[in-house]
Image: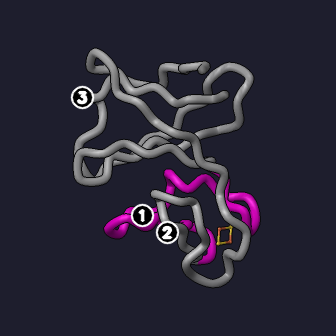
Amino acid sequence: MNLVKVCEADALKAGEMMGVEPDGLPPIAIYNIEGQFFATSNVCTHAVAMLTDGYIDGDQIECPMHGGMFDIRSGAPTHFPCTEPLQTWPVEVRDGAVFIITG
Ligand code: FES
């Protein structure tokens, strides 16, 4: 199991997100949804936009470009024009830090 540290847990309050670019990985968005952390690709699958420039609505992320939406927990597209899912990574919190599991 490969753990990659992406941020400190207290860096993100509930309802917040941040973009990270760990070495060797694509841009990733880290979210705190009601105290639980999630990680998806930060790049919209519709065209090219960074999702962390968009808006969190409950457990959905709305793309800033054309208003498409994804389920933050699963990466599934939930609103037109997005039809392709986002890549997601499992997340683990250890000793106050947030890690994604990359393999
Ligand atoms: Fe995200 Fe079009 S680029 S909805």
Q: Which of the marked residues, 1 or 3, is nearer the chain's N terminus?
A: 3
Q: CA distance from mark 2 to mark 1?
A: 5 Å
Q: Is residue 58 above or below residue 51?
A: below
Which residue is at the front of the view, 38 or 22?
Answer: 38
Residue position marked by numbered label 1 in the rendering: 55
Q: CA distance from mark 2 to mark 3?
A: 24 Å
Relative placement, left or right, of 68 versus 24 is: left
Q: Amino acid at mark 1?
A: Tyr
Residue position marked by numbered label 2 in the rendering: 62
Q: Is residue 7 magenta?
A: no
**Tag 1 secondary structure:** strand
The quadrant in which residue 3 appears is top right
Q: Amino acid at mark 2?
A: Glu
Q: Amino acid at mark 3?
A: Asp
Residue position marked by numbered label 3 in the rendering: 10
Q: Are marks 2 and 1 in contact (CB under 8 Å)?
A: yes
Bounds of the magenta span?
Answer: 42-66
Count neighbours of disc 1 (C-alpha within 10 A) and say few if under 14, some if 14 to 19, many if 20 or more. Answer: some
Residue 88 in the image: state x and y as whole percent. 59, 48
